[in-house]
Image: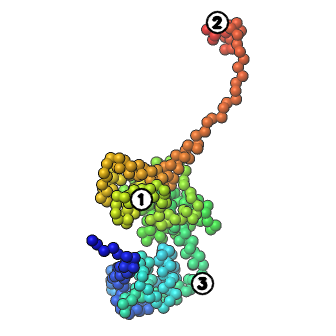
Amino acid sequence: MSKQINHDELEIAVLDSLKKINREKAAHTAPVYSLTEILALKNVTELQQLGKTLHVKYYGKLPKMELIPAIAETMQQEHTLLNLLYTLDETEWDFFQKVVATKHLQIDKIHTGSYYILQSMGLLQCFYHDDKLWFVVPDELKDVYLKLAKTNFPEEKRFRDLLNNYAIASVSLYGVVSQEEFVELFNSQNERQTNIDQMFPILLNYIYTDVGYCFWNEYIVDSDFEEDDFAGVQSLISRRQGKPRYSPPKEEFLKYSDWDYYEVTPQLIALKRQLSKLIDDPYTVLDILDEIHDISVLEARTQEYFDLLDYAGVVFESMEQAGAMMQLIVDVRNNTRLWANYGHTPNELFSLEKSKLRLPHPERPISIKAVGRNDPCPCGSGKKYKKCCGR
């Protein structure tokens, strides 16, 4: 019988795992503080990639000892550092601000996602020394950053990050949104306004960092559409023709800027409850729920759901049990926000369409005078009614 791991043991195991990963990413030496010393810790391939990003002349031909000062000189230019900092996501930006405010930051419990991009861009360096992790922003970059901090850079950074978060939320919720609709949506929820000419180059900088969305013609689209050369974009637009766009309030909308976010509906909770009866591992249950939500967004075929459950080792004892599971999945699908419905759930869209069905207003009653059989026929023939239309 296996021993159950308690909370403290699990926390220690997680911390040890994080430290091991961080040690692999760190320079195993005492911290250094100058930009050239930190760049010297990188290999030629890393330096050439950084030189390419910074548009350093002859980055692919210069030897390491010449490439280092060329990169250092470029990075100390205000506009260069400005552009690098603009591309940082909120997690990276928050961590950079913590490190730049100190000579060095000593911290052991940190995820590589907080600093890996920063380190690859030369903005900071992780060191493993005296069995501890140390993080350093080069002194030269600190000086440039302090100058930038006295300008409108912090406010501009927040504005750009907000635009980026709106773009992520838009493709997460809709899959595809036109640039015009994106600007309209952003401006409807924010005091500071934007336009396509301003928005496009800002978001283009984020796209270079593989942010999860890209431009296609006049649209902002999920990067996954690249796999079929964007053929799916036009198909999606056609399928949702005439459907209204779901527009939640700003706070709810921006939750979708987290790629992992989706609404936990009562239907998902009911499905989770049933899956927990069939699967012992709670983490597997959560993984399956994530998968079911994701393929529901893409309107997967019924068989794909059962393939997923089969892969997870779910065995149904009867057809009734399988049917009950399928009904729960159908309920989830009908309450999942679909790209094809422009963010609405099938049930929401059905309710919206149903509300449009109104009984027509009754026409004004027509006064009809009784016609006797011997009266002139109202059709105007001149004949008596009994010998014309009254036959």
| Comes first in the chain, label 2 or label 1 | 1
- Which is nearer the eye, 74 or 2? 2
Q: Residue at coordinates 60% horizontally, 81% vertically from top-left? A: 151
Q: Which residue is mark 1?
A: 272
Residue 371 placement (x, y as % from top left):
70, 13
Task: Decide if residue 192 is on the left or right side of residue 337.
Answer: right
Residue type pointed to by label 1: Lys
Q: Which residue is mark 2?
A: 387
| Comes first in the chain, label 1 or label 3 | 3
Local SS, label 3 = loop
- Which is nearer the eye, 284 or 112? 284
Q: Which residue is mark 3?
A: 150
Task: Decide if residue 245 is on the left or right side of residue 272.
Answer: right
Q: Which mark is residue 220?
A: none
Residue 315 placement (x, y as % from top left):
30, 54
* Residue 122 position by quadrant: bottom left
> Looking at the rendering, in which quadrant would you find the N terminus?
bottom left
